Amino acid sequence: AQTVTQSQPEMSVQEAETVTLSCTYDTSESDYYLFWYKQPPSRQMILVIRQEAYKQQNATENRFSVNFQKAAKSFSLKISDSQLGDAAMYFCAYPTSGTYKYIFGTGTRLKVLA
Amino acid sequence: NAGVTQTPKFQVLKTGQSMTLQCAQDMNHEYMSWYRQDPGMGLRLIHYSVGAGITDQGEVPNGYNVSRSTTEDFPLRLLSAAPSQTSVYFCASSYSIWTGGEKLFFGSGTQLSVL
């Protein structure tokens, strides 16, 4: 069965520092996508970054980058130069192209300390 | 362009009452879905639809009903509300999930409390 696991319920980071959020997944598919979504206190879900499994290069969006290890089925999110506005719940997600279902992890709450 | 419009934002029900959460998108998206978000459990898929007239169950479908008569609308019905259905509900859509590469567009969520 396809699963997504986020083992860190909560993380803290000092403003301007770097933090890495972990995500592991399980799938038998060879070609797929992985996503990180952010949910700030406003409750709105916002796409942070997307990774295509067949691409060896890790995706990057400004201060956000991923460390994608396909063989290890690991998909971690690195936030550099953390800002107060980065404080949010972060969800790792995997859309199963064969069954049309998005699977979400349980989330990691990130606190940014001033 | 309104995106995904979800109503109401807040709702309080008594056990046994029924209600419908509304979801509409104006982006001509094929795929629409409903999730519930509970603390420590992430987002769990309730029902989804890959086009008008086509719906299917997700991970936690019991106690919920859906239909999709138009491309734009995908309402979620609670048949007989129970306290276990207290949650935050999200509607989400994407142009197509066939390749898995499409991001989801989310509504603003509904905080539902069942007393």
Image: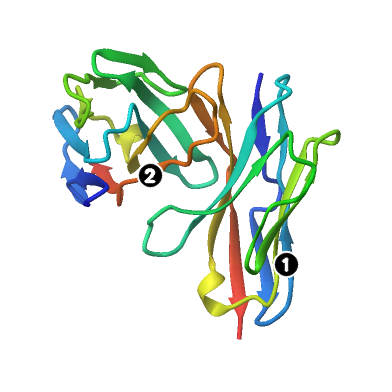
Whether marks 1 and 2 lie on the same chain = no
- Residue B46 position by quadrant: top left
Q: Secondary structure at mark 1?
A: strand
Residue at (73%, 78%) from the top-left corner? Answer: A17
Image check: B94 left or right of A25? left
Is the residue A25 above or below the residue A45 in the image? above
Q: Position of residue A6 (x, y in %)?
A: 67, 45
Q: Position of residue A55 (x, y in %)?
A: 74, 40
Image check: A97 left or right of B60? right
- Residue B73 position by quadrant: top left
Image check: A96 left or right of A19? left
Is the residue A93 above or below the residue B60 in the image? below
Along the line of sight, which residue is nearer the eye, B85 or A67? Answer: A67
Which numbered dot is residue B36? none
Chain to which the residue tagged by mark 2 belongs? B
Chain to which the residue tagged by mark 1 belongs? A
Circle 2: residue type = Phe
Task: Look at the image and name its color scheme.
Answer: rainbow
Residue at (68%, 82%) from the top-left corner? Answer: A16
Specify the quadrant that holds the N terminus of chain A: top right
Which numbered dot is residue A19? 1
Which numbered dot is residue B105? 2
Foreground mark, 1 or 2, reads 2
Q: Secondary structure at mark 2?
A: strand
- Residue B53 position by quadrant: top left
**How far is mark 1 from mark 2, CA to CA?**
26 Å
Label 2 environment density (alpha carbons within 10 Å; few <14, some 14–19, many ≥20): many
Is the residue B34 above or below the residue A108 in the image? above
Along the line of sight, which residue is nearer the eye, B41 or A99? Answer: A99
Residue contact between numbered discs 1 and 2, judged by CB atoms under 8 Å: no
